[in-house]
Image (cartoon, rainbow, N blue to C red):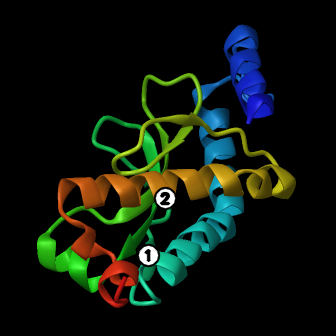
C-alpha cells in the first residue's frame, strides 16, 4: 500500500497521472483504469457476498458516468434483500475523478478516499486488498448504521 501512496505523491509533485497531463488525457486513463478494475472489484464484492451475505447479494456495475459537477464516477454495488428492505446504501467500491481533482481515487459508500493508480492489469490486481478493505469497511459501517441483522451470515447461524 505504501507503493500506491508514493505513486500518488509523485503524481502531485510531477503534476501528472500515469504520464497524462491534461484533464482529457487523465479522463482517458480513468476510463481505462475502471475497465481494468472491473474484474477485481467484482471479485472483492463477490467475496463479501459469499462470506457475509451467504450468496444472497447481487453485484451491479454502473460503468463510467459523468457527475453533474463534471467529474467521472464508476461504481460497483453489492445489494441484498435485507439491505434493500432497510433502505440503506449498498456495499460499494467507487472510483471517482472529481472535476477539481488532480487524479482519481477509490472509496466506498461510507469509507473515504484511497489513491487510484491503475495503469495496467498488474496495477488493477494489486488493488484487490484495498478493495477488500473498502468493501469490509462499508459492511461494518452499514451494520453500525442499521443492525447486524443486515448480514445473513450472522442471522442464518445460531452462535
Q: Residue at x 60, y 34 (%)?
A: 24
- Classify mark 2: residues with Cα within 10 Å, few (<14), some (14-19) or many (20+): many
Vertical position of residue 127 compared to residue 24: above or below: below
Position in image of residue 31 (x %, y %): 62, 52
Vertical position of residue 13 compared to residue 53: above or below: above
Apparent side of residue 122 relative to residue 71 in the rendered image (left or right): right
Q: Secondary structure at mark 1?
A: strand
Q: Earlier in the sequence, mark 2 or mark 1?
A: 1
Q: Residue at x 60, y 64 (%)?
A: 41
Q: Residue at x 80, y 49 (%)?
A: 123
Q: Secondary structure at mark 2?
A: helix
Residue under circle 1? 60
Q: Nearer the viewer, residue 50 or 114?
A: 50
In which image quadrant can residue 39 be found?
bottom right
Q: Nearer the viewer, residue 67 or 123?
A: 123
Position in image of residue 15 (x %, y %): 69, 14
Amino acid at each position: 500500500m505504501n507503493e500506491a501512496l508514493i505513486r500518488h505523491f509523485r503524481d502531485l509533485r510531477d503534476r501528472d497521472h500515469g504520464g497524462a497531463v491534461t484533464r482529457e488525457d487523465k479522463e482517458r486513463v480513468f476510463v481505462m483504469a475502471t475497465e481494468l478494475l472491473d474484474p477485481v472489484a467484482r471479485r472483492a464484492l463477490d467475496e463479501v457476498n459469499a462470506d457475509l451475505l451467504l450468496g444472497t447479494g447481487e453485484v451491479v456495475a454502473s460503468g463510467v458516468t459523468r457527475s453533474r459537477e463534471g467529474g467521472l464516477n464508476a461504481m460497483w454495488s453489492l445489494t441484498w434483500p435485507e439491505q434493500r428492505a432497510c433502505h440503506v446504501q449498498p456495499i460499494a467500491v467507487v472510483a471517482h475523478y472529481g472535476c477539481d481533482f488532480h487524479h482519481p481515487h477509490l472509496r466506498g459508500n461510507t469509507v473515504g478516499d484511497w489513491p487510484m493508480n491503475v495503469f495496467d492489469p498488474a496495477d488493477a490486481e494489486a488493488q484487490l486488498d484495498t478493495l477488500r478493505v473498502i468493501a469490509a469497511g462499508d459492511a461494518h459501517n452499514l451494520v453500525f448504521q442499521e443492525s447486524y441483522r443486515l448480514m445473513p451470515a450472522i442471522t442464518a447461524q445460531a452462535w
